[in-house]
Image: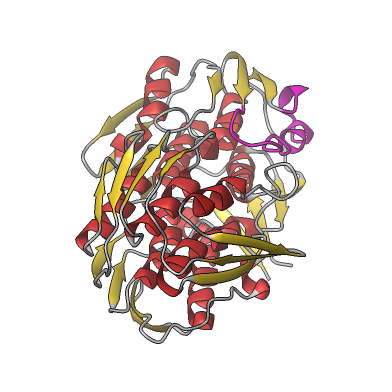
């Protein structure tokens, strides 16, 4: 198994570029199934989850041509297969995003329960997806661990999300875009990726209003066209690099980003004494010798992102004072706290959803295992500021969402070796 060997304590400085948004790429790729015309995608991140999506598309019959380091042409005209291969679908949770476009276009889809990382209680539920598709008129059958959905033509409906869900909102938006009649979705998620997906669909001929607000109204259309789409910068990567700069006390400029998408983090930086400057597409972090502790509670956008919670916990090990980290979105997302404690952090586990961090503490190298994507990048930050040589296993989880992270951080002065 590949692993990272990281020698901590190196001075970091310079510029780092943000890649395309993982959480948008994994929706745009399956959305190409909604049309039989060619689609060109730009600023696609070269990450494992995107590669799995491309493999799924190819397995369904799509013709894909790489046109540049971060661009693809996709033609799905010959798509006839409506069954998602368990070999790929069970590797990552984003495979669920293929269900809506296949159902809307072919009238049928068969798929296994999606795979992914360990966060969530056991297998992460897909009940809201199933309920939503049923509301649009799909007939649902469950055969063992496979779901079989059928609908000659989906019909518009009114649907209220009992739990705010980003992927659920996006899936229903895609399905309703080609349904017959009007669909009204209520209690929708507000993430920027949802607005960007709606922008792409509308440019293709969809009629979607209200994306980025709690209520989205969609007038279904018979056909969508192809076109071109550029994926926006990854806001989680932007926030992660900002936290790294603060924790490592490194003068770091983050380029090709959108600071407006991480206002919740930047507001916290102001409170704790981490100075920064921001432009429309750049963010510069100035090192602070000391900064204060701050308690956070994760919340749906525009609140504090659950995907930055682990990295922020590492930052709080270097802050002056006591902070509480309260995870409200996912179960089992504080599993990494024990590894930080092994490194010397003073962390008290209150319950499965809350930890108390007392700082500042010196961190020391340990052998670690990445439990999931976001905790994995937090382990890298911890290793970079720790004393000694840290080994991180299960880095596939990190590769799922961060393009060439080893090479990019080494350009800042880090000492990271990838051992295959």
Give the residue drawn at x 44%, y 46%: 169
Q: Specify the farthest residue to the top.
A: 321
| 190 to 64, vertically: above or below | above
Q: Residue 363: give x, y in percent of width and height.
A: 69, 33
Choose between 237 and 167: the one closer to the eye.
167
Choose between 130 and 317: the one closer to the eye.
130
Q: Give the left or right position of residue 341, taking residue 291 as reference.
A: right
Q: Give the left or right position of residue 44, taking residue 134 as reference.
A: left
Residue 354 visible in the current orientation: yes
Question: Picture quarter containing residue 185?
Answer: top left
| 377 to 42, vertically: above or below | above
Choose between 21 and 154: the one closer to the eye.
154
Q: Is residue 215 magenta?
A: no
Q: Is residue 347 magenta?
A: yes
Give the residue drawn at x 62%, y 47%: 127
Q: Residue 263: give x, y in percent of width and height.
A: 35, 29
Give the residue drawn at x 68%, y 42%: 120
Q: Which residues are magenta?
A: 327-352
Q: Quadrant of the N terminus?
A: bottom right
Q: Quadrant of the C terminus?
A: bottom right
Q: Give the left or right position of residue 129, taking residue 241 as reference.
A: right
Choose between 92 and 136: the one closer to the eye.
136
Q: Residue 333: give x, y in percent of width and height.
A: 67, 37
Q: How many marks?
A: 0
Residue 414 visible in the current orientation: no
| 95 to 237, vertically: above or below | below
Question: Picture quarter containing residue 303?
Answer: top left
């Amino acid at each position: 198994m590949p692993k990272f060997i990281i020698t901590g304590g190196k001075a970091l400085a310079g510029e780092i570029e943000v890649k395309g948004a993982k959480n948008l790429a994994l929706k745009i790729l399956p959305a190409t199934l909604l049309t039989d015309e060619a689609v060109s995608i730009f600023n696609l991140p070269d990450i494992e989850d995107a590669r799995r999506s491309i493999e799924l598309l190819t397995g369904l019959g799509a013709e894909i041509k790489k046109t540049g380091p971060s661009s693809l042409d996709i033609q799905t005209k010959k798509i006839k297969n409506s069954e998602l291969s368990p070999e790929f679908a069970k590797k990552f949770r984003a495979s669920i995003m293929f269900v809506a476009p296949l159902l809307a276009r072919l009238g049928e889809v068969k798929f296994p329960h999606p795979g992914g990382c360990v966060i969530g209680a056991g297998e992460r539920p897909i009940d809201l997806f199933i309920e939503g598709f049923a509301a649009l008129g799909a007939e649902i059958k469950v055969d063992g661990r496979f779901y079989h959905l059928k609908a000659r033509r989906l019909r518009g409906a009114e649907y209220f999300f009992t739990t705010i869900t980003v992927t659920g909102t996006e899936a229903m938006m895609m399905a309703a875009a080609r349904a017959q009649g009007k669909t009204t979705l209520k209690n929708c998620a507000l993430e920027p990726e949802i607005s960007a997906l709606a922008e792409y669909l509308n440019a293709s001929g969809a009629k979607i209003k209200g994306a980025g607000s709690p209520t989205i109204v969609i007038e279904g259309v018979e056909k969508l066209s192809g076109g071109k789409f550029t994926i926006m910068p990854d806001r989680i990567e932007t926030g992660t690099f900002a936290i790294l700069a603060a924790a490592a006390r490194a003068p770091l400029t983050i380029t090709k980003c959108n600071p407006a998408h991480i206002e919740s983090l930047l507001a916290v930086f102001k409170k704790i004494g981490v100075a920064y400057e921001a432009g429309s597409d750049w963010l510069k972090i100035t090192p602070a010798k000391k900064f204060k502790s701050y308690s956070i509670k994760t919340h749906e956008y525009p609140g504090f992102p659950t995907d930055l919670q682990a990295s922020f916990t590492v930052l709080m090990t270097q802050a002056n004072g006591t902070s509480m980290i309260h995870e409200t979105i996912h179960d089992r997302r504080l599993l990494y706290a024990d590894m930080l404690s092994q490194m010397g952090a003073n962390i008290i586990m209150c319950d499965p959803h809350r930890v108390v961090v007392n700082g500042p503490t010196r961190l020391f190298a340990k052998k670690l295992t990445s439990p999931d994507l976001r905790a994995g990048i937090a382990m890298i930050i911890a290793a970079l500021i720790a004393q000694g040589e840290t080994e991180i296993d299960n880095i596939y989880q990190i590769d799922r969402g961060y393009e060439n992270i080893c090479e990019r951080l080494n350009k800042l002065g880090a000492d990271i070796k990838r051992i295959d």
